[in-house]
Image: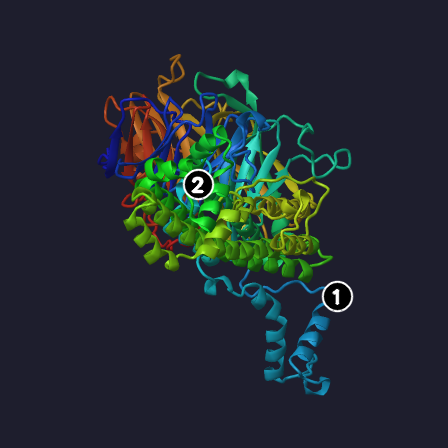
Amino acid sequence: MAEEPRLPVQSEKVLSYAINPHLLAYCPRTDLLAVVTQDEVIEVYRIGGQRAFVVKRKSPSTTIVGLEWIRDGKCLAVALNTGHVDIVSGETGKVIRHGGDDPFSIEAANPKSKTTRGEITCLGWGTVLTRETANTRKPSKSGLDQSMIDDLWTRLGLKHEDRPQTDDGDDDLEAQGQEALLKDLPRQLAYLDVESILPRLSPIPTRHTASGRYDMFSTQAALDDYFDSMQRKDRLAADVMFVGHAGGRNRVTVDDILEIKYTPDYPGADIMWPMEEEDETPHALVPLSYTSHPRSKLHALLRAEPDDILSDDSQPGHKNLQLSLFDIPLMSSGGSHLHLIVSRTAQLRDLCGYISCSIVSAKSDWTTHTNLPSRFMEMINETLEEKNEGVLEDNLYHLAMTGNYTPTILEWLRDELAERGHKRWDHAMTTLYTELSKILHTNLLPVLERSAVVATNLRGLARYYSDTPHFNVPPEVFTSILATLSSLQLLVHETVQILGREQRQFRAFSKWLRHQIDLAAADPDSLSAKDMAERETPQLDISNTLAYLEGGLTKSRLKAIVFSTPEIEASQQPTTKDLISCIHSARTGQTDAESEKLLSLHLWSSHLTHVCKSAHQHITLWQQSSKPQTLDIPCRTTATSSVQSHLDVRMLETSPQYFETFVLGVPSKATHEDDEIVEIALWHHHMGPAGLSGETGTGWRRIGLPASSSSSSSSSPSSQITALKFLDDETFLCLFTYEDSHYLLCIPYRSQLEDFRFEWRSMEEMEEKGLVAKRFEKGWVPGWVVANGRTGRRNCVVVEKGRKAWKTFDLEGFRMGLGREDDEEEEDMMFG
């Protein structure tokens, strides 16, 4: 017998509680393992066994049904029994997107108001290229490119005879180069990085954000990382999240913003496209597993029907297994600017949320810092009302004009407000004006400028691609966004002026009030008080004090702009012209109740959210206008189409533009009456550059593992496959039980050696071939496995059958004895 394999153990973890072994997610990029406990708590561990962070249960009524890491490990998708998917930060563990919430609202939706979608049975992340090469140009549109070129030459001040003339026989390379540069100008303008020279956005305090949905705004590091990554993000690729629901209704979300409804077995004209939420799907196949390849235009989905006959206590079996290949029309119809469109749309959504958070922050500051002065004024107003002496502002105005104290005001200044109360009042209002000024200057104005750049970029793309399928969205929707942003900028600038004026008036009032408190404490009729009044009164700014008493003290225009939350009818569409008219009326004191509604940051922020939603709906309609193409491939052996629960699927590139999809499964019935073999079925499908419309091929291969001689006679077979999982493009992992021993097998599925057989009739033969990676010690029974096949970091995590422990094994040093050199190149890190 060959020497027993010794696979290096990287780490071992033992828990005091059980985990759900069917909810394991391993991130190859960051080496983080996410598990779900029996209490529905997500725990994320590093490869060494240290706990990184914990995500607590969302609510007692929710359960987790799926976990999946994005390719770069920046976030973790969590599928819930409500049919929604939450997105959790892979760095902090905070929920950054709540499934079912309005993406343009900072308020978390009421769970009772959310529409429950079908049960999620499949969750996966993928990456797709939005362009085949970096030099791909926008497809020509008749009558557009040449007219644009002529217009550009005209704007450069060149006459027709001065322009370089090119034809098919022209060898003037310089002229051709100028023409090529000019044709490429629209693309260069689209990717022009204007935002890098804009002021960077400042963080918003966490206490002002809603339910942690915008934690990316709470720190400067999070803000810079997010918006810088939007600029650095590869323009050739987009992230795709696939969510499969029971009954066949599936959703594909591109870059966390554009959602495409995809349903296989599209029946034709009998059902409208895109399908409505309540439409029933015409089949009962359940999505099981999803995979894709970055350079492939097609995505692979494994589907089947539940087979109650094969059900056991853990996982049910499946029948009518099918491999569905489908495309995303958006990927092909979006043109070379697809990723720019998607990322700009996502950025506009988050900038809209940043604006809303900033305005909520200003409103919260107003409530917090005006609370103390309001209490001071309420107490004295109650006393004045009891004595029929008017209100505080009238009494203070009388005092400022005449210098005469009423007994009530004198007592209030000397005994109730006093020096300590004045300091607290002054500190609260000074802090309020400082915080509001900071929000206006460092939060709102920069984000409005940045939002205008993003909206302008989208409008330019909409005009450039007008009347084409590449971005068939009316430019007018982005014009509405720009008009609303202009109105907000105008109102913010007006608010800055009002803030500065009220702040100067309050400083004068505060200094005057402190002087009156000192006089009241010294007795106004005393000689020292008279000397103090003669000495300090000329230094007081009485005009600004009176102005504050008339307006800022109780009738602040700033309060109406920052704090009020008026609502207007949906039919009303406020314009910048209306706002300008209201501002002029407010300056002259001639405003009415209706016009004052427009002088509210909240109102314009709500209107901005409304027009952004409208733009998002147009973009969604555009990307759902094309019907996806599908190809269903039955996965069956010569004996059966039913399989056990152990399934896995993988797509790989065999040569440039040629792809092959592999499916692993354990048939419920053997193809041969051979008691010495335990069968694994490997289905494969290959396709060329033409995709579904081109030449394809399908086949399957039987892989045989040794069966124990007592398997056929025992009610509990001693040879059993516990788990199957693809490791990389060459091998797959198998947890295998043979007699009383448990093994981790590393089996090739693409070997090209002529003398290589895919059947082994004894464990000794498998060990001689170097296929046995690990024989587990007695008492440690493996049950589940997840793998990382990234070159240079190949490892796997094996969970013990008791669900309270796991071991991490280093597979990088393990090489199968197949007689070939390991000449794999380092994988492209972009695609994980």
Give me the C-alpha separation between circle 2 and circle 1. Answer: 63 Å
At numbered mark 1, what does the secondary structure look like: helix, strand or loop? loop
Residue that numbered label 1 is attached to: 142
Label 1 crowd (10 A; few <14 / some 14-19 / many >=20): few
Check the image and report above or below for 181 versus 729.
Answer: below
**Total marks drawn?**
2
Q: Residue furthest right?
A: 269
**Residue 51, percent from left and from top:** 29, 35
Left or right of 624, for residue 12: left
Of residues 495 and 603, the one nearer the viewer is: 495
Residue 350 appears in view: no
Of residues 727 and 408, the one nearer the viewer is: 408
Q: Amino acid at mark 2?
A: Thr
**Residue 430, percent from left and from top:** 39, 49
Q: Nearer the viewer, mark 2 or mark 1?
A: 2
Residue that numbered label 2 is attached to: 370
Residue 126 appears in view: yes
Of residues 828 and 80, the one nearer the viewer is: 80
| First in residue order: circle 2 vs circle 1 | 1
Quadrant of res 252? top right
**Residue 160, percent from left and from top:** 72, 84
Q: Amino acid at mark 1?
A: Ser
Check the image and report above or below for 233 versus 388.
Answer: below
